[in-house]
Image (spheres, grey):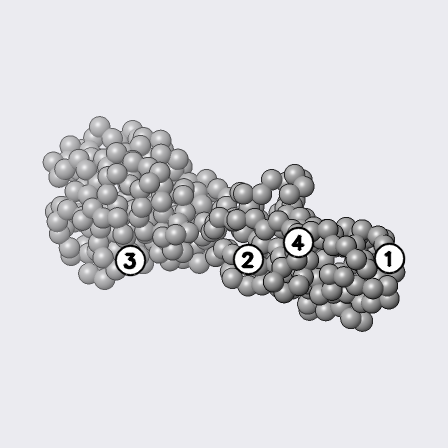
Amino acid sequence: MSGNPKPYPLKNKFYLLFLIIIIGKVNANGNLSDYKIKSELVFNCEDGLSASTAFISLGQARNVTAAGVYHFNIDGEIFSTYVDINGFVKIAIDFGSTSGNLPQVSALTNANRGILNTTILSKFTNATLARISHSEEYIDISTSDSAILSRITTNTTLHKGTADNSINDNWTGTESSAITVNASCTSTRGNSLHQNIVHLCGNTSGFHWIPSRGIQRIRFNTGTFSREIEDEESFSLWVQAPVENIECLVDLNLTKTVNKPIPKVGETIVFTISITNSTNSIASGIQVTDALPVGLTFDLASSVIPTGTTYNSNSGIWDFGLITISSGETISIQISAVVQTSNTILLNESEITAVDQNDEDSVPANGN
């Protein structure tokens, strides 16, 4: 997720009293290590690519960059289904020359007929478009009618005869006239979507999609497409919701060591700062601030700055630029400095000051 960098404070403080005294702790390697390492939680990016990173709303499906099967977890209802490149979420698919109620399932692909079960459909209350399509694009129609959308969430047949003529007029798209024509009788083929999706009862030029009877026809027996669709062809029912942002939460850990906890005037000391990404999300837009205090002079020749990043010794900003940190990856910088003073306590702080993503267990600008 891109955007303006967000503050991400996590300070690691080093206190150096040259010649004799060290304020702080010395670790097993003899390095000064009086700094805070936070115990971080692991968060993931809601990209729908796995059960652990499932979309939590229909609207997040609008962010997909490739059509395919995606995972959802909406209010505790876990399911997977096909999403097209425009973020339409498939809720039913049926093939020509098949018969019987559509199986009510929690996993839907393009390979097997079925419909998402009633509990899942009930979670689609924020859908704003319904769509019916044919695999060969002979029909591709949509509507924003609230009555039609409500019928999807209640597993109710979208058009079941004369009483529904008035709610069926605002379908638009390829071959929409096959569904906006009026029925002349009341369907007796069932009132639930898994039984009967659309039945323009009594109209031979009207759309008929009645799984329970094995009827899948763009027009029943009049005019263009007046035939049963072929075995390998299919009808699909979809919904689409307004776009919602994907939350990408990262967990960055900063660690720091110094090679000489008791340096002498004129010696070069090296601070090693490491940033590790502990989540499955990619972290971007990262900046770390480590401004050297008065008494230390930056030594560029002895420093090791990773390719693609820059270090500004005046501001102390280590800027990752276009570099990202992948899951489990660690990137380190070695900042070298020459000691210019003695008998002085020097405070050196390192802090992650910017990252594009969020980290729920960090409080901006709290100095910790």
Q: Nearer the viewer, residue 220 or 11?
A: 11
Residue displayed at 35% across by 38% down = 75
Q: Looking at the image, do the residues carrying marks 3 and 2 touch, with CB atoms under 8 Å apart?
A: no
Residue under label 2, please give it: 277
Mark 4 or mark 3: name the one nearer the start of the chain.
4
> Judging from the image, what secondary structure is the residue with disc 1 in?
loop
Q: Nearer the viewer, residue 221 or 159?
A: 159
Name the kind of residue labelled 2 in the image: Asn
Q: Position of residue 56 (x, y in %)?
A: 40, 43
Report crowding for label 2: few under 14, some 14 to 19, many 20 or more residues within 10 A (C-alpha).
many
Name the kind of residue labelled 3 in the image: Asn
Mark 1 or mark 2: name the one nearer the start of the chain.
2
Q: Residue furthest bottom?
A: 301
Which quarter shows the C terminus? top right
Residue displayed at 22% across by 48% down = 105
Name the kind of residue labelled 4 in the image: Lys
Mark 4 or mark 2: name the one nearer the start of the chain.
4
Q: Which mark is residue 25?
A: 4
Residue displayed at 29% across by 57% down = 110
Disc 4 from disc 1: Cα separation: 20 Å
Disc 1 from disc 3: Cα separation: 73 Å
> Which of the two marks, 1 or 2, is nearer to us in this view?
1
> Which of the two marks, 4 or 3, is nearer to us in this view?
4
> Judging from the image, what secondary structure is the residue with disc 4 in?
loop
Quadrant of the rendered structure where residue 167 is?
Answer: top left
Q: Which mark is residue 342?
A: 1
Report crowding for label 1: few under 14, some 14 to 19, many 20 or more residues within 10 A (C-alpha).
some
| Residue 172 visible in the displayed image | no
